[in-house]
Amino acid sequence: MRKRWHKKVIFIAPLAILAMVGFGFVVMYLWNWLVPALFGGHTIGYWQAWGIIILSKILFGGFHGRSGPGGRWKHSMRERLEQMTPEEREKLLRGMGCRPESSAPGAA
């Protein structure tokens, strides 16, 4: 069992490193292709491309796994709806332009 785990690590680790290196080059080439032509900006190097990747992660918080469409927002909204009274829930859903569950087709 342990030998299989080591084989997976030996196989996956170089692929992960190769993917990261490739991602940096993709960002660099896209920047150097688009930004000078569209905005008159300067070209960048490999490490500057990684700086842009890290900056975008800090600013936009991307690159993390989600629990499906909607992510955390959907989960927190569901919790808020569960804590509301039926009247509050209906008022909120009407304000959002949604139909309340009681008027949905097929509702009992």
Image (spheres, helix red, strand yellow):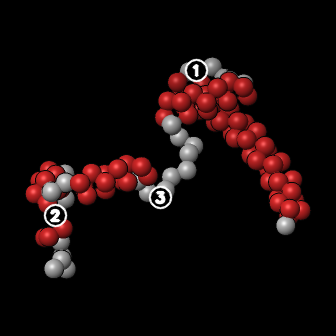
Question: Residue visible at 72% across and 36% down?
Answer: 25
**Residue type, mark 3 in image:** Gly
Q: Which residue is mark 2?
A: 100
**Residue type, mark 1 in image:** Gly
| Image mark for residue 41 | 1
* Residue 72 appears left or right of 14: left
Q: Residues within 10 Å of mark 2 (few under 14, many from 20)?
A: some
Name the element at disc 2.
loop
**Residue 55's spot in the image, x, y percent?**
57, 27
Spatial distance from mark 3 to mark 1, Cα to Cα? 37 Å
Sequence-wise, the earlier of marks 2 and 1 is 1
Spatial distance from mark 2 to mark 3, Cα to Cα? 24 Å
Q: Residues within 10 Å of mark 3 (few under 14, many from 20)?
A: few
Name the element at disc 1.
loop
Q: Nearer the viewer, mark 3 or mark 1?
A: 3
**Residue 48's spot in the image, x, y percent?**
68, 24
Name the element at disc 3.
loop
* Residue 22 appears left or right of 41: right
Question: Residue visible at 18% across and 67% down?
Answer: 101
Spatial distance from mark 2 to mark 1, Cα to Cα? 51 Å
Q: Which residue is mark 3?
A: 68
| Image mark for residue 101 | none
